[in-house]
Amino acid sequence: MTVNKIMVHADYNKWHRMGSDIALLQLHRHVEFSSHILSACLQEPTTSLAPDSSCWISGWGMVTEDVFLPEPFQLQEAEVGVMENSVCGSFFQPQYPGQPSSSDYTIHEDMLCAGDLVTGKSICR
C-alpha cells in the first residue's frame, strides 16, 4: 500500500514547538477494514481525559530521544496512562536554565501527556 498524500496539521509548530503534532495519510487505494485495520476516532477539542486513565499511542517517529525508528518503518504502538501536564513538564526541564535552547520543550495547555514511567514508553519515546 502506498501513500498518496501526507496532510500535516496547518498549525504544526506555529504557536510553539511540537504544537499540533499530528498528520493524516491519504492512501492510493481504499482499504478493507479487518481485525488489524480499523478507523481511528478523534475526540472533540473540548474532551478532557482524567489523569491515570489509559490511552493508546502510535507513531513512526523516534524510538528514543536520540534514535530514529530504523527502516523498514513499522508503526509503533503502546498502551500508556494519561498524566497531568505539570507532572509531564517536570521531565522537560531546560538543560541549561536561563539559556534557552532549541532542544528545550515546554508543555502547553493544548498538549496531552501520556506515558508509562515503569517501561519508559511515552508519546515522546
Image (spheres, rainbow, N blue to C red):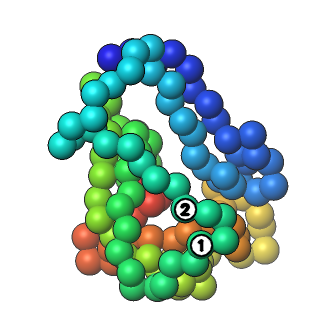
Q: Label 2 sits on what residue type? A: Gln
What residue lies at 33% left-to-right and 70% top-to-bottom? Answer: 80
Q: Is residue 66 above or below residue 46?
A: above
What residue lies at 54% left-to-right and 36% top-to-bottom? Answer: 24
- 63 to the left or right of 124: left
What residue lies at 28% left-to-right and 27% top-to-bottom? Answer: 32
Mark 2 and mark 1 residues within 8 Å of each other at the beta carbon: yes
Whole-number angstrom distance, CA of label 2 to CA of label 1:
6 Å
Q: Label 1 sits on what residue type? A: Thr
Q: Is residue 82 above or below residue 58?
A: below
Query: x%, y% of residue 73?
Result: 32, 30
Q: Evaluate whether residue 93 shows in this view.
A: yes
In what quadrant of the picture does the N terminus appear? top left
Q: Quadrant of residue 17?
A: bottom right
Residue where numbered disc 1 is placed: 47
Q: Residues within 10 Å of mark 1 (few under 14, many from 20)?
A: few
Disc ID at residue 39: none
Query: x%, y% of residue 64?
Result: 38, 53
Of helix, strand and loop, which one carries label 2? loop
Disc ID at residue 43: 2
